[in-house]
Every structure is written in structure tokens, then in C-alpha cells.
């Protein structure tokens, strides 16, 4: 799978967070539940100071038990939390994979390939940025 190396500035994400792992049989339900929670009209309207309309799926706080998943939006100011989780995507180097296709199937298939790609990962925060229904960029933090 092809990718490019990019340098990103720090991003602040506001959304909903849960803990899971790739071995968790409920992983799909947990992650899907975060997206459903985010996309209720009352919740999307409460997230203020959005930088753009792109949703972000962030994977962070990795340890041997799993990781945290956050479904949210990038914001310029997260002072008003309104009951949401605030997470930071660190500035740094990322391998950027551009994916086109069904948002669920194409992303799942891409992650399978990414896990097999020999990258010098930092595990500080990997994320998907949903540019449209069929265009998604996946960023993997690297050294």
C-alpha cells in the first residue's frame, strides 16, 4: 500500500472516547457506537470552533491491553467541552495513506494492510480523517 511522509502540526479533537483492542469481540460495536453518538444532531451542534467539516477517528493511549478510540472533530479552541472528551494529536511525522471507497469496508481493509506495512511507529496517535463519504486519509505516527 502506497503512502507519503508528512509533517503535521498539533491538532485538538473534541468528541467521544472509549477503550478497546483489536482482540475485543465488541470492538466494532464500541467504535460504531462512538460514531452514532457523535452524529446525533444535538451532539454535532454542540461541538464549537470546528476547523473544518472532516470527522476524525483517533487511536491513542496505546498499551499492551489496547487503546482509546475517539470519534470527533478538530477544533481551534476546546475551552467549552459541553460533556465531550478533548484529545490532542501530537505534532510530528506521519505516514499518510489515502483511501477511496466504502467508508467502513475500505478503511477496515486498509488497516489490515497498514498493520503489515513495516513502519517505525511511535504509537502516540494514529487517526483517520474523513474527507467525504468515499475519501479518507489515514495517518500513522512514525519516528
Image (tube, rainbow, N blue to C red):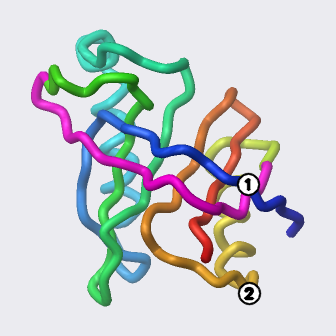
Q: Position of residue 108 (x, y in %)?
A: 63, 61
Sequence-wise, the earlier of marks 2 and 1 is 1
The stretch of residues the image draws in magenta is: 82-98
Out of 109 and 130, give the one closest to the viewer: 130
Quadrant of image for the C terminus:
bottom right
Q: Position of residue 52 (x, y in %)?
A: 54, 19
Q: Which mark is residue 6?
A: 1
Considering the whole magenta stretch, tell me its main secondary structure.
Answer: strand
Position of 79 with respect to 53 (left or right) is left
Out of 31 and 54, give the one closest to the viewer: 54
Q: Position of residue 98 (x, y in %)?
A: 79, 49
Position of 77 with respect to 89 (left or right) is left
- Spot the residue most to the right: 2
User: Is residue 97 within the magenta segment?
Assistant: yes
Q: Quadrant of residue 79?
A: top left
Out of 10 and 100, give the one closest to the viewer: 10
- Badge 1 marks a residue whose secondary structure is strand
Q: Quadrant of residue 78?
A: top left
Q: CA distance from mark 2 to mark 1?
A: 17 Å
Position of 102 with respect to 100 (left or right) is left
Q: Are marks 2 and 1 in contact (CB under 8 Å)?
A: no
Q: Residue at x 24, y 56 (%)?
A: 18
Per the image, the residue denoted by label 2 is 118
Q: Is residue 112 above or below residue 105?
A: below
Q: Residues within 10 Å of mark 2 (few under 14, many from 20)?
A: few
Q: Residues within 10 Å of mark 1 (few under 14, many from 20)?
A: some
Q: Residue at x 46, y 74 (%)?
A: 123
Amino acid at each position: 500500500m502506497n503512502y507519503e511522509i508528512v509533517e503535521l502540526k498539533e491538532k485538538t479533537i473534541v468528541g467521544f472516547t472509549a477503550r478497546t483492542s483489536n482482540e475485543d469481540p465488541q470492538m466494532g460495536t464500541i467504535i460504531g457506537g462512538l460514531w452514532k453518538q457523535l452524529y446525533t444532531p444535538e451532539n454535532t451542534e454542540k461541538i464549537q470552533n470546528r476547523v473544518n467539516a472532516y470527522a476524525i477517528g483517533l487511536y491513542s493511549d496505546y498499551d499492551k491491553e489496547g487503546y482509546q478510540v475517539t470519534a470527533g472533530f478538530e477544533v481551534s479552541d476546546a475551552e467549552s467541552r459541553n460533556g465531550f472528551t478533548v484529545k490532542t494529536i501530537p505534532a510530528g511525522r506521519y505516514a499518510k495513506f489515502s483511501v477511496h471507497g466504502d467508508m467502513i469496508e475500505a478503511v477496515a481493509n486498509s488497516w489490515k494492510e497498514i498493520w503489515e506495512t513495516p513502519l517505525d511507529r511511535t504509537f502516540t496517535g494514529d487517526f483517520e480523517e474523513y474527507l467525504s463519504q468515499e475519501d479518507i486519509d489515514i495517518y500513522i505516527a512514525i519516528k
